[in-house]
Amino acid sequence: MSSRGHVLCVGSEGWQPSRDALADAVGDAEIRTATTAAEALELVSAWPADCVVAASRLPAGDGGGLALLERVRAVEPDLPFVLHPAEGSERLASEAIGAGVTDYVAGTDGTERLGEAVMAAIDGSDGESARIADLVRTIQQRLVRARTTEEIDRGVCEAIVDTEPYAFAWIGEYDAADGRVVPRASAGFESGYLEAIEIRPDDSSLGQGPTGRAVRTRTLEAVQDIPSEPTYEPWRADAMERTYRSSAAVPLVREETLYGVLNVYADRTDAFDESENALLCDLGKTVAHAFHRVRIQDRYEAQYRELFEEAPVMVALTEDTADGPVIDDCNRRFAAKLGWSREALRGRPLADVYSEASVARLLDHDGYERALAGEFATAERTLLTRGNERLETLLQATPRRNTHGDVVGTHALYVDMTEQKRAREVIDQAEAMEASMDGMAILEPSGEYVYANQAHADIYGYDDPAVFLGNTWRMNYDDAEVDRFESEVFPAVAGGDEWRGEATGVRADGSPFPQELSLSPLADGRYICVVRDATERRRYERRLERQRDNLEILNQVVRHDIRNDLQVVLGYVESLRTFVGEDRTAHVERAVESARDAVEITETAGDVAEVMLTADAETKPVGLGCVLDEQVSEVRSTYEDTVLTTDGTIPDVDVRADNMLGSVFRNLLTNAVEHNDGAIRKVTVAAAADADTATVRVADNGPGIPDDRKDAIFEEGEKGLDSGGTGLGLYLAETLVDRYGGDIRVGDNDPNGAVFTVELPVVD
């Protein structure tokens, strides 16, 4: 290969594209190397670089390869840029394409592939890569919004045909029963093409085209010259009539499941080179993932629908309108009990099936408003059948939300009590009570137990429900709750009203727990008590609240335009170094530091987003030593003016965590350094483990943390003393540790400073 240009390789001391190996791949092109972003930018400005090859990781403070891309493009907008990570990933590839790299070549793809990408960039193929990158971004945006497989099919095909040189695109699926590939969506110039052709993924001539081969091999298959390709004979005439000259078939595969095959046609030959095919393969994986997501969503919705339809109680979904609640839908039992068809009930005012007294409770006594607010207590309601017969029911109503989280109506569950006028007759059915997951009991007017089921005993931590008999309900509460019940709750129940609310119970071992409780008066003066442990619900609600709060934070902080503008600002400010006098150098460096800090904020916010959006991700055994050693080394190299030491040996144990564990220690170590005002900043890391728990301590000699802020610093948006950050780091650490089932706390160091302690469960 002849001399064709100047190549700048940028990477840290620990990893760079091999100069000798790359030289073999690009001929005698001149190659220079840089180890920092500043050095690379200086060469870009002073040396006629034709292409930049950058690692994904650069020395701490440089922001990585994609950050370098922004700074290079600020001074050389058209300079080709190839991102070359040591180990690639779908996520990094997607980010790189979205950022506008000329090409993306993982280290595992080999030096020859890198050389081809570099020479293609030098030869001017960056326009092609940009075109494909724009296509990928467009399709990804449509996939995010898609809620059905039809929307995915249509969005992908339409986006493709809007991109040169594609003339036609369609998605088909393999029908095993019929042995054919059947089209299900298309876009572009087709003119009956799909009706004219037949494709079978077998050994016949109808299976030798790109589509049939892609279905069989699960790999991309392309035909670069339709007019001369022998295997395209069965479809050549129809394709030529419609100006198709080359074709590629991309299997949509995820976890060995084939979701279809994407077929793309161009109006010129040789349209699918190696680089374009690689990107189309990545696109196929992305589309397949979207199909998988929709399939899981459909499965959950089908399960919900089955539960809704087969529920052993009457269920109605209401909609809140300006004219009052209407029946949006109902299950078969609800319609059958009232003697109407479901179609006749949909859109009908809920008041139409209520008795006059129940309508008053629904509308005049704010029953529906309380249900919308989540404050409704189980109450009796009388429904009217089509034959005007009265149906006595017990109603429980909860808010119903749309996909945006807005309350749009209620879920209303009705238990037919026509044959059981009072709850006592239901409670007497011992089998139903014993099978209940809720704790159920009957209390005398004095508060003494006369009955309790096994679930009631389990909730309070007792083996046998007989322990309650002869005792009063007071045994399950502390003095403050007893006073509240005696002064507020029982007087209301004694007056004939049902009470439903929350309380704090006390288990047999003395530990408190949140509970949902209802008390219903019986005709003979006794009470029905139903209790449910609300611990998991509280934890789930707190997690959802944290997710929503963090997504709002990220929506304010991590915006594409802001991030891009910061990169431009950083590039321009750094370029000022050569234009200002020594008396202004400190100002420029302060501006550079502030801009870099702002860019780093987006990285922490990205970690927060990943945690929040994968709140239900499964944990796994993770080696504590490897993760902690890696983070200590990275922080030590970043803050060379800090004395960062390890006290003793880090135990070689596995803890219950996930791939985000490193973020916990990175944020704690960075926090210990950046908020340290000591003359010589010192940070010490110590770790120990027993059979059950691994403990990691991060101690510093900084100003410490006041007692009144030790809990608050883990809340989102809380900043440390004199902090310039967002307050996300410690909140992220606490969120992750909580996910792992561990604990994190802060105390005082001796003689000064703070000590953060993390406890994680050890995996046997």
Image (tube, rainbow, N blue to C red):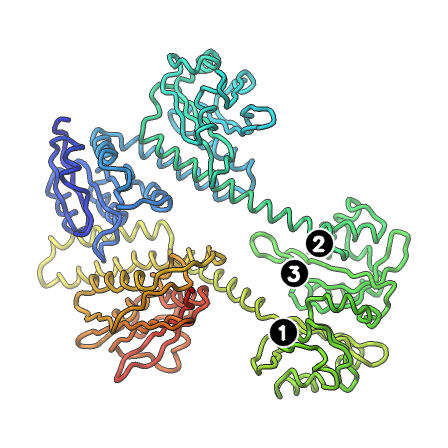
Q: Residue placed at 79% from the left, 57% from the top? A: 351
Of 589 and 628, the residue lying toward us: 628
Asked if residue 716 shows in the view, the reply is no
Q: Residue placed at 55% from the left, 23% from the top? A: 180
Residue at which label 1 appears: 515
Label drawn at residue 399 = 3
Name which quarter of the figure residue 481 lies in: bottom right
Q: Amino acid at mark 3?
A: Pro
Name which quarter of the figure residue 382 lies in: bottom right
Task: Pinpoint residue 469: horizontal percent, then vertical percent.
Answer: 74, 83
Q: Residue placed at 24% from the left, 78% from the top? A: 701
Q: Residues within 10 Å of mark 1 (few under 14, many from 20)?
A: many
- Secondary structure, mark 1, is strand
Q: Residues within 10 Å of mark 2 (few under 14, many from 20)?
A: many
Tell me if 323 is positioned left or right of 696 in this view. Answer: right
Which corner quadrant holds the C terminus?
Answer: bottom left
In space, the residues marked 2 and 1 are separated at their CA atoms by 26 Å
- Secondary structure, mark 3, is strand
In space, the residues marked 3 and 1 are separated at their CA atoms by 19 Å
